Amino acid sequence: MTRLHLAPLFLILLLVVVPPTGAFLVPTTTKTTTALYFFGGLKDAFKNDESLGKAKDPGLSGGPQYNEQVTVNGKAVPGAVAGQKLTVVANKVRVRIPVNCQKGDCGTCMVLLNGRKVKACQTPLPASKATIQTL
């Protein structure tokens, strides 16, 4: 064998026989945490910016708009939220409105809302008085 062929073999033997630096050190135990403080770290990011004004409470500013003037087949619906789908509102008083497509294409969910035929899966509850009758 030539010297060029022996050089890689010598390096391999050297690595096997002589351990790398620090191989004889005793490992120490350290306590680590995996908590991510991403949003906690951003808490004080804009602390000195006075143009932002006073901090507001998080969440809905006005809350949901309740409609207490809702009846489904003559049953009053407590806690109905304006904007909810009529199927959800009817469910609160355990009146089932059959739904097939959830898109308003099939017409299975037709109900009377204040005397007008509407599709319950697509129609939101109005903020004013609402009388819902199933067909």
Image (cartoon, rainbow, N blue to C red):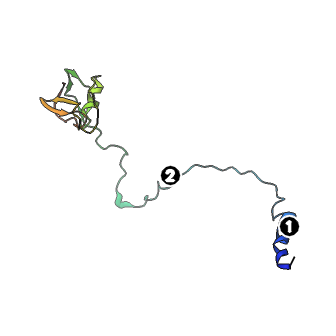
Residue tagged 1: 13
Q: Is residue 17 positioned above or below 36 on the image?
A: below
Q: Using the rendered view, name the quadrant where residue 26 is placed.
A: bottom right
| Residue drawn at 60 percent across, 49 percent down | 34
Where residue 5 appears, as percent x and y from the top left, is 83, 75
**120 or 26, which is in the foreground?**
120
**132 or 61, which is in the foreground?**
132
The outermost residue toward the left is 115
Which comes sooner in the sequence, label 2 or label 1?
1
Where residue 25 appears, as percent x and y from the top left, is 82, 58
User: Seen in the image, is 52 located left or right of residue 39?
Assistant: left
Q: Is residue 6 positioned above or below 35 on the image?
A: below
Looking at the rendered structure, the kind of residue marked 2 is Gly
| Residue drawn at 53 percent across, 52 percent down | 37
Where residue 95 appears, as percent x and y from the top left, is 27, 23
- Circle 1: element type: helix
| Residue drawn at 27 percent across, 27 percent down | 98
User: Seen in the image, is 37 located left or right of residue 135?
Assistant: right
Q: Is residue 94 positioned above or below 54 on the image?
A: above
Residue tagged 2: 40
Quadrant location, the N terminus: bottom right
Looking at the rendered structure, the kind of residue marked 1 is Leu
Q: Which mark is residue 97?
A: none
- Give the Cα separation between the discs numbered 2 and 1: 52 Å
**4 or 135, which is in the foreground?**
4
